[in-house]
């Protein structure tokens, strides 16, 4: 299995718990539809200070998602549960990678924790 055994709800709880420990508020949004993701990003309030994104297959072609992430003017960390660079050729290209602060791929659900830790540290430094 490429994606592990934890459910999305399990991962969200683990990330929220880590957020509380880091004293940062977390919010979660999931959709399989690029337009819904764009709408969500465009609705973010000014108190949002960073984005952890796992765009799934949209990673490889989602130019409107890319544009919405750029327009947010927020630091972005791209996360993938599986190592997209060790999979099929078409999965190795990300339209998000070059606009993100970094990309975490292949570390399973823990990648979200590492992304949150990075953003929390970045925010404390600024």
Image (cartoon, grey):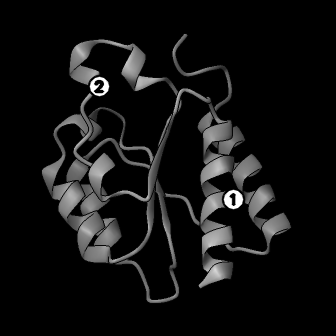
Considering only order in the chain, which callout, 2 or 1, is on the residue closer to the N terminus? 2
Q: Which corner quadrant holds the N terminus?
A: top right
Residue 117: mark: 1
Q: Secondary structure at mark 2?
A: loop
- Residue 26 visible here: no
Q: Is residue 97 left or right of residue 86?
A: left
Q: Residue at x 63, y 60 (%)?
A: 118
Q: Which corner quadrant holds the C terminus?
A: bottom right
Q: Residue at x 16, y 39 (%)?
A: 61
Neighbours of disc 1 within 10 Å: few (<14), some (14-19), many (20+): some
The percent coordinates of residue 7 (x first, y second) are: 64, 32
Q: Is residue 108 left or right of residue 17?
A: left
- Where 42 sits versus 90, above or below? below
What residue did someone put label 2 on? 92
- Where 22 sits versus 36, above or below? below
Residue 101: mark: none
Q: Residue at x 36, y 35 (%)?
A: 56
Gap in angstroms between the C-alphas marked 1 and 2: 25 Å
Neighbours of disc 2 within 10 Å: few (<14), some (14-19), many (20+): few
- Where 74 sits versus 15, above or below? below
The percent coordinates of residue 42 (x first, y second) are: 28, 75
């Amino acid at each position: 299995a490429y994606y592990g055994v934890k459910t999305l709800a399990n991962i969200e709880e683990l990330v929220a718990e880590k957020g509380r420990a880091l004293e940062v508020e977390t919010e979660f949004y999931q959709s399989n539809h690029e337009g819904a993701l764009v709408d969500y990003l465009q609705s973010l309030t000014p108190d949002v200070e960073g984005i952890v994104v796992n765009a799934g297959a949209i990673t490889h072609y989602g130019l409107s998602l890319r544009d919405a992430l750029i327009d947010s003017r927020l630091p972005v960390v791209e996360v993938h549960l599986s190592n997209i660079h060790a999979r099929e050729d078409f999965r190795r290209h990300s339209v998000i990678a070059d606009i993100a602060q970094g990309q975490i791929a292949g570390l399973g659900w823990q990648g979200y924790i590492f992304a949150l830790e990075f953003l929390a540290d970045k925010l404390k430094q600024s």
